Image: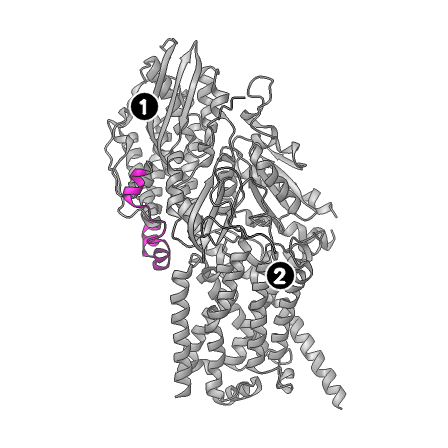
Amino acid sequence: MFESTIINSVIAVVLTVLVCFIISTLLPGIERKYIHARIQQRIGPPVTSPGIMAPIKFMFKENVEVSSPVPGLYKALPIICFLVVLCVLIALTPEAYKIPALSSLVAIVGFLKVEEICYVLMGALSKSVMSVRMPFPDNVKGGAHLNATKSFVEDISSKRSLRMITYGSFPLYLALFAPVTAARSIFLSDIVSYQQIHGPFLFTISGAIAAIVFFIGYMIILNEYPFSIIKAKSDVIEGPYMEYAAKYRAVVVVTRGFFMFVLGAIFSVLFIGIPPTIFSWGILVNILVALIFVFMMGIFSAFSPVFTNRQLLPTILGTTLLGILAIVVGLL
Amino acid sequence: MDEKVPRSNIIETEIPMGTVHPAALEPYRVRFFVEDEIVQEAEITIGVNHRGIERIMEGLPVEKANALTEKICGICSNSHIWNSCRTAEMGLGIEIPERAKYIRVLMGELERLHSHFLYLAHGCEVLSHETFSMRIFYMREIVMELLAMVGGNRVQYGCSVLGGVRPRCDLDEAKLLRIKNDMDALEEGLTGFVERFLADSILMSRITGIGVLPQKQAIELAVTGPTLRATGVARDLRTTMFEYDDFDFNVITQPDGDVKSNLIMRALESFESIKLIRQAIANIPEGKVINRDWEMFDTDITESYIEVPRGTLYHSYALESGRVRHCIIRTPSMANIGAMQYACIGDQITDAQLCIVQCDPCFTCTDRAIEIVRR
Amino acid sequence: MGIKSFSRARAIHVMLVYTGGCNGCDIEIVNSILSPRFDAEQYKVFLTWNPREADVLVVTGPVTHLNRKPLEAIYEAIPNPKLVVAAGSCALMGGVYKNCYGDIPSEEIEGPVENIIPVAAKVPGCAVRPQDVLAGVVSLLPTLLDAD
């Protein structure tokens, strides 16, 4: 009896993850084709191209020797990122609620932190051809500061992702903890069952404020355009992902779409109280939430330039205050 | 223990960018010396795309050399051929028909439009604002179509020849009407864009006070063109050029010398260009477009200055049995390199490329001078 | 058509390298990708600035001395299969800068691009038209699809 429950649970989780994964590969294409291209008055790429066909194409490319001081670790990082996102999704499924250590907010925050630390390491380990390694006679007679140490553009990106860990992703974590004030428990099963009795947390004052904070945090952690300081095209080009080629780039591309979906699923669990599972129509709500988030993010990113510290700090400060307000309102 | 090398100055790190970089439309190397992501000093290395055009021009028949000047730059190609012809015309005393003068001004202003639109689009692209960049590129396409209609090619149209303009570039009624209609469409589109652009508070906070070039510094660095006018100096060579005698236009200035001033400067100048094109269409005189009634003789070195989209362009050469001698070309970006290096200081590294772009660099123009090494 | 060819036909990443032309071709190519009028993305052609991501390298300009090594380095960095499009007359034969003194080759340029890296497609024109660039990149598809 006990074994069959475990087997059933595993099958349920695997099926759920599979369905979520397939849907998540469409999200980058939807953002590009239906939001960006539409706003920019052009036809745009096919929906399948950015999210599905590009990773498959990268899978068939020949692998190259990455230029990095620790190639093994550098190549492992996107896989770690993918596994982390996968773990978050597994923690969200109702079958995982039986393991309290996994299905608590602390675990989810921990997983997200690992994801962010990966960006720091990626940036620090990538030594791309696009900056210092570009063969150019810099140190010549008459050049300025010939003794200065040279940094790769990815090094700036790495420093910036460290800064993002310290304060950038603060709004997201505040928003994650806002539902705790209502449910009085950090375990997802309690939060879900509280909302199934009292109605979605989203429709309270505290929940509505926290949802806005969550959305800003969602864009920050996904490095989407206004907040994409770690991969701003105008200076660091692609930042941490510069050296990934072939299969590793495929993993990077897939992880992005998957992460979009999983963050949407986190929202639907914490704010609406519907966990992603294949055995209920509730999964449609999860998909809908993920799509709405992608639509909103697409509209925001199409109309904003990349931020520098001057805009980033006030935005994050304001959002953080809003997040604190949501928690305080929830506690009262 | 290794020997410690003392540093002559305290510079935290150096970040080189180029010769291939997304923010740069052309190859150049720039080294930023940064401290905590704030640029302390910048060094731009040009000469990356040196092809030696002046050396190639040396000894060519003047007609051929004029055509070659077009290949100096793909953005302001018409200005180069115009000024090169003007140099020979001034030296040889060739009278240009009135109609040709009008067509040259018209092409010059169309080119200013396409150059300024490119500047705005590139600026938005470096700001990572893809949508605005695309909108401007869409409007720029109208101008490109007009240039292709008049000159037959989208980029290098070879309008001016010695004594006037090519007969192919003559404008009939249908072409004039099309230019007129397109100018209306362009003005409408640009007005809408500028209103939207100025109302965007995120974008405004992003570009206000970035890359400031003070007026005093701009004059010291001998900055020319819209970059100078954006610091508040009303200096435009078009006011002194005889081609523009019949035209009525304002010299636009902006007060601050930052990226915002520069962007608005280009947008407002585009409106002036549209005004000039309308005047040219309305008053274009009848007659020939080319004067073939002239003789070739040897001349001394003749100099000619004109105002091109990016500033002051200088051409000079002497003619010797119909061939070009001692050719010197000085393009506006040469003067503006100092401004680029100065403007990035004190700004974030994300804004540094923007500060370079705000001075409207054209390094392909600039890289021509040859150095004679005596051995 | 296998899954390999199928996916390659639906996502082509293009990287641009300017090697010292007159800017005319460069801007026309940027125009062909950034302008909604031509919109390369509708033909599944995406712009990238990272050589590790690219499939097709579009080169413009006669390769000047200082641009030779960067061009080689970027070409080396692209993972196989990779193809090069030489766009514009400078890139495919040196343009006005080659053989400028009659028969004597110019000392200022190293090009055409063929001398430095293998070129798969040549797009003529001075300057190239955006339509031609797109046609050139798309014409490489059969070669790209069959490569292993």
Give the colour scheme of this rendering.
one colour
The C terminus of chain B: image quadrant: top right
Task: Tell me residue A109's x, y (percent).
Answer: 55, 76
Question: Where is residue A92, by image quadrant?
Answer: bottom right
Q: Which residues are magenta?
A: B192-220
Of marks 2 and 1, the one in the foreground: 2
- Residue A192: x, y in percent? 54, 85
Q: Is residue A325 left or right of residue A245?
A: left
- Residue at numbered disc 2: A252
Residue for badge 1: B101
In the displayed structure, B353 sits above or below B293; it is below
Q: Is residue C116 visible?
A: yes
Picture quarter with the N terminus of chain B: bottom right
Circle 1: residue type: Lys
Element type at mark 1: helix
The local crowd at label 2, few if under 14, some if 14 to 19, many if 20 or more residues have their Cα within 10 Å, is many
Q: Nearer the viewer, residue A182 or C36?
A: A182
